[in-house]
Structures are given as C-alpha cells and as structure tokens.
Image (cartoon, grey):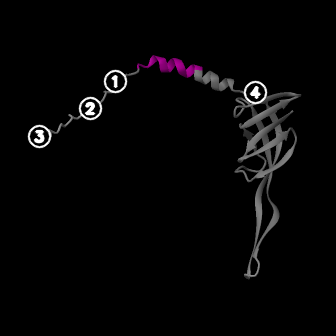
Amino acid sequence: MYAIVEIAGQQFKVEKDQQIFVHRLVAEEGSKIDFDKVLLLDDAGTVNVGAPVITGAKVTAKVLEHLKGDKVIVFKKKRRKGYKVKNGHRQYLTKLEILTIDAKAPAAKKAALKKEAKPAAEKAPVKKTVAKKPAAKKAPAKKTTAKKAE
C-alpha cells in the first residue's frame, strides 16, 4: 500500500516504514504528525484518486530528527567583466518515518458532532430580514431642439 501525500507544499510517494526527508517542519523530535492532504491511495492495485484530496484519508508520521542538507555552491561569473560571486546554501530538513496509512480515518466523530449540532440550531428561531429594493431611477426627459425656419 502506498499513498501520495502533500507535505510542506511538496508531493511525496510514501509507504509504511519508509523514511523521507522533507523541508523543516515545526514539530518536536519524537512527536507524531498527521497529514490529511492525501492525493492518491493504492491498496493492492485498487487506486483511489482524490478530487483534489481524499476525504477521511490520513498518513501518520513520526519526526526522527531535524538536520541540514548537503552544501550547494552557487557560483556566478560574467566573462571579461571581472564579476564573480560565490555563495553557499544548506537546506534545513526534517527526517520522517511513515507509521501508518489510513484510507478511512475516524470521520464518524465529526459527523456525529454535526448531527447533534443541527437540532439545537433548528430550535432557535431565526429572524428574517427583508432587504429593501432600491427605487427605480427615472429616465431623463429627452430634450428637443426646435430648428429656426428661415
């Protein structure tokens, strides 16, 4: 079973017990994170594609560590002009381990809460306000000009 999940603005193909590197997430090391933006699920050949996401699907991951990626050298040069610039960059990363992929997360609690909230809303009287229509504008009178007869 695998899933395609959107994590920190990027899409990843993940499987259970897989370790991936993503852009730095705001989470403690050792904590668990749930990702609800599941775009595709494949369960033994049965593919479920979301529009744009699959409702009720969830991927749970554990934060293993925060680290920095490899150094990337950015070198710019314009020939015959004496222009050279050297820059370096190291991306902040988070290492995740995928724990579970749930096709149907417990959305029954949310549905039950909505059902309980509806009768309370129906009991309360709702005041209706009627919006006044703006007065119709009168068309300006046509001006006629009399021609002088010679």
* Nearer to me, 108 or 54: 54
For disc 3, the marked residue is 149
Q: Secondary structure at mark 3?
A: loop
* Mark with earlier residue (3, 2): 2
Mark 1 and mark 2: Cα distance apart in space: 21 Å
For disc 1, the marked residue is 130
- Residue positioned 75% across, 36% down in the render: 39
Mark 1 and mark 4: Cα distance apart in space: 44 Å
Picture coordinates of residue 37 (x, y %)? 71, 38
Label 4 or label 2, whichever lies nearer to me, is: 2
User: In the drawing, does residue 104 fall left or right of residue 143?
Assistant: right
Give the crowd class for mark 1: few <14, some 14-19, many >=20 residues within 10 Å: few
Picture coordinates of residue 98 (x, y %)? 83, 41
Mark 3 and mark 1: Cα distance apart in space: 57 Å
For disc 4, the marked residue is 104
* Nearer to me, 21 or 133: 133
Picture coordinates of residue 46 (x, y %)? 85, 26
Give the crowd class for mark 3: few <14, some 14-19, many >=20 residues within 10 Å: few
In the picture, which quadrant includes the N terminus? top right
In the picture, which quadrant includes the C terminus? top left
93 over 104 or under it: above or below: below
- Residue positioned 78% across, 34% down in the render: 40
